[in-house]
Image (cartoon, helix red, strand yellow):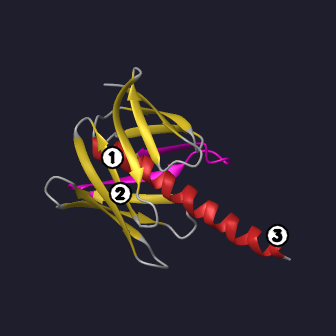
Amino acid sequence: MQLNLTWKKGFFSNNCILYKNGELIGNLREKSFSNTAVAELNGKGFLFRTKGFFKQHTDIIDSSTNQVLGEISYNNWKSKATISGRNKTVNWSYNNFWNTKWSLSDQNGIEIKYAGSSTKGSIQSNTDDALLILSGLYVTNYYWQISAAVVVAICIPILAS
């Protein structure tokens, strides 16, 4: 089974909207000034809650039962992540230098490929697992936010002088 999705997000928006054949099927919404995001795909809802300061990780929670389903662990270089839960482990990584292509994969044949920028993109998946599809998009948004924060932290002192 091949699943093809697209997503759109405004440049300063915290809401990413997912489409299948032009029809709205889900979204990923970052909550402002918190380490949480709410996501839904095909009627399945999840909450992503990031914890920690120097070594952060994200709990993935079923929004209907409030049960922790898994965890996202990030590497120190902010270029890879591991999604664990429900008796499976999936690896997230960038696939090109410009960080416009990334993927989720595991040893059992799951492969989800993403391509895009900070405002739009596409997803090609051989699984309809909503948790994995949304987790791959969440990790990318998480890394983009960190990159933006670093750029701001570097630019403010330069502009202030």
Helix, strand or loop status at disc 3: helix
Query: In the rendered structure, are the residues bearing label 3 and label 2 in contact, judged by CB atoms less than 8 Å apart?
Result: no
Q: Is residue 161 above or below residue 151?
A: below
Residue 66: say if magenta: no
Residue at image position (16%, 52%) is 64
The mark found on residue 132 in the picture is 1
Q: Residues within 10 Å of mark 1 (few under 14, many from 20)?
A: many
Residue at the spot of label 2: 83
User: Which of label 3 and label 2 is nearer to you?
Assistant: 3
Which amino acid lies under the numbered mark 2 shown in the image of this protein? Ile
Q: Is residue 139 above or below residue 74?
A: above
Which amino acid lies under the numbered mark 1 shown in the image of this protein? Leu
Give the Cα distance between marks 3 and 1.
40 Å
Residue at the spot of label 3: 159
When asked about the image quadrant of residue 70, the answer is bottom left
Q: Residues within 10 Å of mark 2 (few under 14, many from 20)?
A: many
Residue at image position (22%, 42%) is 44
